[in-house]
Image (spheres, rainbow, N blue to C red):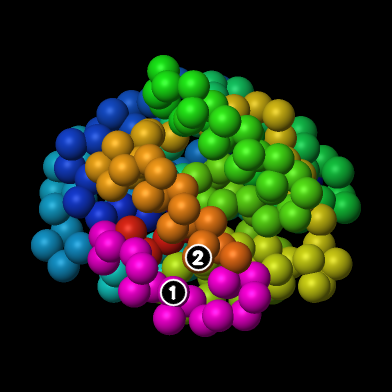
């Protein structure tokens, strides 16, 4: 298979962290071409204005993580799309692992094992639960860094235009069409800032409640009122 990569990063007010993330991506090993696309959902495009790497493709669109990732995918030239959150870091062998994984023609994509950047033991428990859940349901969340063959992503209809749960909804459609994904043992590291800002137990209970209601059939539009405006995602 051809193994060119497009790393798509949806952002919203990430001026303090975006260049740190982009620098980390330069350390990732790959024998194949890699393009990086940053899609800003802010009307001010403040994150795009601070990017120092001129090789990064930048684009602005309406706010909404699903819409932003769709916009990035529309610009992508890679055969493999890697959807990366702005507060999540990939291991240096991530792309070679993805390429090797997708040598299995039965797989359309996958995601990684989650690790949360914190010394608190409770975050280790949360990360283990998230990984276990995704292994059972085969519906990983965005902070596990979802990757897909571009041909599959386009054929499935891309991310739905919904305010949250876009990652789970996409995985549902993939499963319905008989597609298979892999949950890799390799870890990606995501920031604990969401839990730190809003409160660990509040976020844990809220997210569990919202996920349960979504699986019960409650619409993402109704569930969105429980999320702060700047999030609108499951991660």
Residue at 53%, 76% (x, y): give it.
160
User: Within the magenta stretch, is there residue 139?
Assistant: no
Q: Secondary structure at mark 1?
A: helix
Q: Can residue 143 be spotted in the picture?
A: yes
Residue 118 position, x and y percent, is: 40, 23
Numbered label attached to residue 223? 1
Report the residue that reaches farthest toward the top: 119
> Camera-side residue: 119 or 164?
119
Residue at 26%, 66% (x, y): give it.
229
Q: Can you identify the residue that label 2 sits on?
A: 210
> Camera-side residue: 160 or 165?
165
User: Within the magenta stretch, is there residue 226?
Assistant: yes
Residue 90 position, x and y percent, is: 50, 30
Residue 126 position, x and y percent, is: 54, 36
Q: Secondary structure at mark 2?
A: helix
Q: Are marks 2 and 1 in contact (CB under 8 Å)?
A: yes
The residue carrying pointer 1 sits among few (fewer than 14), some (14 to 19) or many (20 or more) residues within 10 Å by Cα, namely some
The magenta region covers: 213-230
Total marks shown come to: 2
> Camera-side residue: 107 or 4?
107
Mark 2 and mark 1 lie on one chain; the one further toward the N terminus is 2
Residue at 58%, 72% (x, y): give it.
214
Q: Can residue 71 be spotted in the picture?
A: no
Residue at 41%, 44% (x, y): give it.
201
């Amino acid at each position: 298979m051809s193994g060119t990569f497009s790393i798509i990063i949806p952002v919203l007010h990430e001026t303090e962290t975006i260049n740190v993330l982009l620098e980390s991506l330069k350390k990732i090993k790959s024998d194949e071409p890699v393009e990086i696309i940053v899609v800003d959902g802010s009307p001010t495009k403040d994150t795009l204005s601070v990017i120092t790497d001129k090789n990064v493709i930048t684009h602005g669109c309406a706010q909404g993580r699903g819409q932003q990732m769709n916009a990035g995918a529309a610009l992508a030239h890679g055969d493999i799309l890697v959807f990366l959150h702005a507060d999540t870091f990939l291991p240096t062998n991530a792309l070679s692992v993805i390429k090797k994984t997708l040598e299995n023609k039965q797989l359309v994509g996958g995601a990684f094992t989650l690790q949360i950047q914190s010394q608190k033991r409770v975050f280790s428990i949360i990360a283990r639960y998230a990984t276990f859940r995704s292994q059972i349901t085969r519906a990983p969340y965005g902070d596990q860094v979802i990757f897909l063959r571009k041909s599959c992503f386009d054929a499935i209809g891309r991310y739905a235009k919904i305010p949250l749960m876009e990652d789970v909804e996409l995985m549902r459609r993939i499963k319905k069409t008989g597609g298979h994904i892999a949950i890799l043992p390799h870890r990606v590291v995501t920031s604990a800032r969401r839990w730190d800002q809003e409160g660990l137990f509040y976020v844990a209970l809220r997210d569990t409640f919202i996920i349960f209601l979504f699986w019960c059939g409650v619409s993402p539009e109704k569930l969105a009122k429980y999320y702060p405006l700047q999030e609108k995602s499951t991660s």
